[in-house]
Image (cartoon, coloured by chain):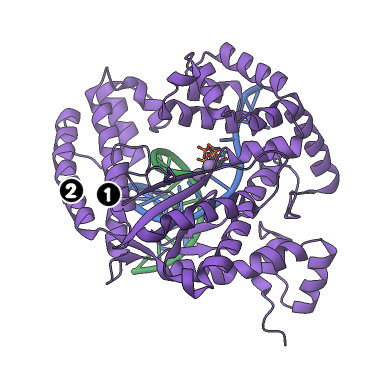
Chain colours: A purple, B green, C blue
Amino acid sequence: MKSSFNTQLANWLLDPDGASSPIEDAEVLKKKLFKEDLMKVYEEVELPLVQVLKDVEAVGVFIDTKALQTLSRGLERQLTVLVKKIYKEAGEEFNINSPKQLLDIFSRKLKLHLRSTNVDKIAQFKDKHPLVGLVLQYRELAKVRSTYVEPLLTLTDKGSRIHTTFIQTGTATGRLSSRNPNLQNLPKESQWADDVRRAFIASPGYTLVSFDYSQVQLRILATVARDSRLIEAFQNGEDIHKLTASRIFNVSLEKVTPQMRRVAKTLNFGIVYGMGPRALSRESGLSFIEAQNFIDSYFLEFSKVKQWQEDLTQEVSSKGYVTNLAGRKRYFTEPINFRAAINTPIQGLEADILKRAMIQIHDVFSRRKEWQTKVRLLLPVHDELLFEIQNDTIQEAVPLLTTLMESAYTLAVPVKVDVKMGKNWATLTPYKKKA
DNA sequence: GGTTTAGGCCAC
DNA sequence: AAACGTGGCCTAAACC
Ligand SMILES: Nc1nc2c(ncn2[C@H]2C[C@H](O)[C@@H](COP(=O)(O)OP(=O)(O)OP(=O)(O)O)O2)c(=O)[nH]1
Ligand SMILES: [Mn+2]
Ligand SMILES: [Mn+2]
């Protein structure tokens, strides 16, 4: 009766898709973990992480409820106006939230006979048909209110803190997920993103500090694919997202905006994980032919990446599973999703890196009295850790946290973390160490 | 009344 | 034929 053994973790490591039926017998599970080389990640990562996550959940994030309430009322008012405009423009009342009814309205009123109503499909008509633009505005407002503002208000506790629940055994790659509420998908780009994030504030006397790994999956890719072009790029401090942005938008590196870089991020990972020319053309604005050429030259430039993908495709076909550098494993059955197989070891190692960093940081900061209350881990976001740090401790703690994160796992390229800080989550500015 | 599924969209 | 991947949560609609 070893109550210390965590059967849920073990079963998940053995089959993170949960396709096979779970095993209850701890001794059987242990043998399997050994046999499949999963004991290391179980003992060094997942088991110690349980307590870390408990502590993080208990701390919670301080919320400016006043700001959220104000936002809520503003959204409510604007939605009312918008709904009336939409009904007037459409000439009748209907449920705007129903894609089915929307298709019907578009068909009858605008003579637009569409198959779906998602933003990519209908945005092109918004100049010709005011109704389309109004509907898209409505979608943005309704989304932010129903998915973020109202649930956050409901879930904020009496002490004005919000506590998510982390799911440690929920993903197929090894990542964490967050629910009730999901704090890992708060808006960042949309019109209302800043209003929502402004409500996430530091406790009095503290500052929010965010540590985010730079281009993390590209650095992992450079390592696993042994691609000399990528490796040299990172050794030279290059920013591949920015480089791709400058090529796509045809501007110099200095003229790449944060928005352009964000688009390029999607393109870089899209291409690496099997995006086709049609999707690339849609995401980038390039023509289909240009998109095709871009993909071809991409894999010419990063030629070892292509080779690695082909090797991995062979491997998953013969073995029926893939593993990452930390030993984490995922099984694939016919028909094999090769794009998912290619993504898995890379996304999975990202998770291992962040988890190891969290555990080390927890050992140093949360277990020691002199640090405990001064440095609080609030939230992991896949390759980012958000802390609140006591104001008089920042200069001391930030270099230490940075070093811990950058040395949590050794890659074939430098591992770099970008640090930003601020009083709320909307207005973080790059950390500059004081002279 | 409850559940499940689909379409849609937010993040990394 | 062509297909970036990993998640969670919203509403509507179909189902029990
Ligand atoms: N497949 C895929 N993975 C993504 C996408 N967006 C983000 N990711 C993954 C890969 C990233 O390395 C990782 C962390 O996201 P970040 O937003 O922090 O981007 P990244 O670290 O690459 O760049 P950064 O230097 O932090 O701006 O999440 C995407 O659109 N597709
Ligand atoms: Mn990052
Ligand atoms: Mn990130």
Three-letter code for the amino acid on which mark 1 is drawn: Arg
Q: Residue at x 63, y 58 (%)?
A: A356
Q: Residue at x 71, y 68 (%)?
A: A43
Residue denoted by label 2: A76
Three-letter code for the amino acid on which mark 2 is drawn: Glu
The secondary structure type at the circle numbered 2 is helix
Compared with residue A185, is residue B2 higher up or lower down, i.e. above or below? Answer: below
Compared with residue A330, is residue A167 higher up or lower down, i.e. above or below? Answer: below
Residue denoted by label 1: A145
Compared with residue A341, is residue A25 higher up or lower down, i.e. above or below? Answer: below
The CA distance from mark 2 to mark 1 is 8 Å
Compared with residue A286, is residue A364 higher up or lower down, i.e. above or below? Answer: below
Between disc 2 and disc 1, whose residue precedes? 2
Name the side, left or right, on which A141 lies relative to A13.
left
Quadrant in which the N terminus of chain A is drawn: bottom right
What is the x, y in percent for residue A241? 54, 29
Quadrant in which the C terminus of chain A is drawn: top left
Tell me whether the residue at label 2 lies in contact with that at label 1, contact meaning CB atoms closer than 8 angstroms.
Answer: yes
Chain at tag 2: A
What is the x, y in percent for residue C6? 59, 48
Q: Nearer the viewer, residue A312 or A66?
A: A66
Name the side, left or right, on which A270 lies relative to A197.
right
The secondary structure type at the circle numbered 1 is helix
What is the x, y in percent for residue A333? 75, 48
